Image: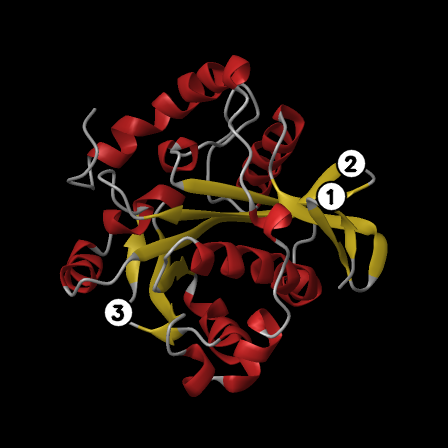
Amino acid sequence: MNTVDAESLTFSKCDNISLQLARTTDDYLGAFTLVHDSYVRADLSDPHPMGLRIMPHQLLDTSQVFVAKYDERVISTQTVVVDSPLGLPMESIYPDVIGRHRASGRRLAEVCCLADRRLSPKRFFDLFSELSRLMAQFALRHGVDDLWIACHPRHAKLYERRMGFQLMGDERDHPLVKGNPAVPLRVDLINLREEYPKVWTQFFSEPISEPALAPTPHPEADWEYFQRIAEGCVGEFAESSPHVAA
């Protein structure tokens, strides 16, 4: 994977695809639009009048959106939400599991809001893996011990086999994706090198430069607009998470 400039990387299989932290309003709009369209297409969410899906957690200073762009168009995205007083999104269904690990003193983060222009995970997994490498190094650089994800049960084996995640609980219905089933997975970043050396090599053997991992201040002029859209989710979160107040 080569560096495009100080703030982005190139996808190993296509020089026209760049991987980076979201930095501009267009980056965020592209990510939120892609998540909306992907979730609606997969019947994980109802359409929003503005064509955007934004979770309150994504707008925190402790969160970071990542994007892959082809000719400046966002084609893949994911978000890492570092634990904060608002909690993690997956606590809406796994408060016991997350609470237990938080109490152990680990610093947790959740990978969420994954979306890609293509339908099949097997087709987009190479790009997702390289974008996840950027995300994982960002998370480790910011003191995260464990990365968590709530995924559909049929995708769990792929995350376990390719990324070193481990199943951490039972299957439950996820209210934030229209009641579809989910299972909790965790990867231990601190012990990954010993437990999954091949995965560690894939994600951490080549350090990414500091400029590519440095976040850019949110575009304040548009952040209020994004926050107003995200407010529509607050009631939904408040019904199932003790960390969110309507």
Q: Amino acid at mark 3?
A: Asp
* Distance (Cα) linking label 3 and label 2: 40 Å
Left or right: 108 as drawn, with respect to 205:
left
Whole-percent x and y of residue 179? 34, 48
The residue nearer to you, when weighing 82 against 99, is 82
Label 2 is placed on what type of residue?
Glu
Q: Residue at x 78, y 64 (%)?
A: 12
Q: Are marks 2 and 1 in contact (CB under 8 Å)?
A: yes
The answer to whether residue 27 is left or right of residue 178 is right
The residue closer to the viewer here, 48 or 167, is 167
Residue 126 can be seen, yes or no: yes
Callout 1 touching callout 3 (CB < 8 Å): no
State which mark lies toward you, 1 or 3. Answer: 1
Q: Quadrant of the C terminus?
A: top left
Q: Residue at 55% of width from left, 19% of height from top? A: 50
Q: Considering only order in the chain, which callout, 2 or 3, is on the residue closer to the N terminus?
A: 2
Q: Give x and y (percent) for residue 37.
A: 60, 37
Mark 2 lies on a secondary structure that is loop
In the picture of the structure, the residue carrying the numbered disc 2 is: 72
Which residue, given by chain and number where applicable, does mark 3 sit on? 170
Residue 23 found in image quarter: top right
Circle 2 residues within 10 Å: few <14, some 14–19, many ≥20 = few
**Residue under label 1:** 69
